[in-house]
Amino acid sequence: MLNKLVISTDKTTAITFHAWQNESNLKPKILFQGMNIKYTNETKFLGLYLTEDIKWDVHIKHLCNILNKNYYVIQLLKTVNEYKYLEKYIFCKISFTFEIWYSFLGR
């Protein structure tokens, strides 16, 4: 326990980032409280799906799934001019992604 924060080694994963052209297999062993931390190819962090090759495919697929699941609701709310739901749920997810993506462009 660090600063009264309990860290679950069962839920904790590690990820190494690399350019898609350079698949590095360098994954040093990480031990925390005697437990081995597993590596993963992708993870969710602050609502973003990150992959080790720094591509957006997984995150875009996740966003498309959310939009597909809510398509009927979006169409229904659009007909009754109920944009509060759209702003709160859908637009916030998309705009957050664009802000992060734009910052990666270095502008």
Image (tube, rainbow, N blue to C red):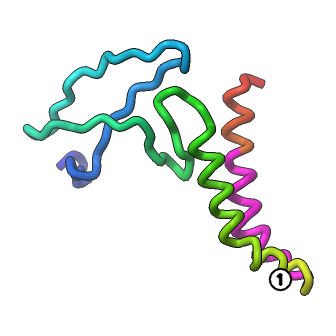
Most common secondary structure along the magenta stretch: helix
Residue at the disc numbered 1: 76
Count numbered badges in the picture.
Answer: 1
Q: Callout 1 environment at 10 Å: few (<14), some (14 to 19), or many (20+)?
A: few
The quarter of the picture where residue 105 lies is top right
Residue 78 vertical position relative to residue 66 in the rendered view, above or below: below
Q: Start and end of the magenta stretch?
A: 81-97
**Residue 96 drawn at (x, y percent):** 69, 50
Of residues 31 and 73, the one nearer the viewer is 73
Amino acid type at image mark 1: Leu
- Where does the C terminus fall, quadrant-wise? top right
1 sits to left or right of 34: right
**Which residue is painted at 56% across and 47% down in the image?**
48
User: Which quarter of the picture shows residue 83?
Assistant: bottom right
The residue at 72%/42% (across/down) is: 99
Q: Nearer the viewer, residue 16 or 21?
A: 21
Is 100 situated above or below 9? above
Q: Give percent across and percent down for residue 72.
A: 76, 77
Residue at x 61%, y 40% (from the top left corner) = 57
Confirm whether the magenta stretch covers residue 90: yes
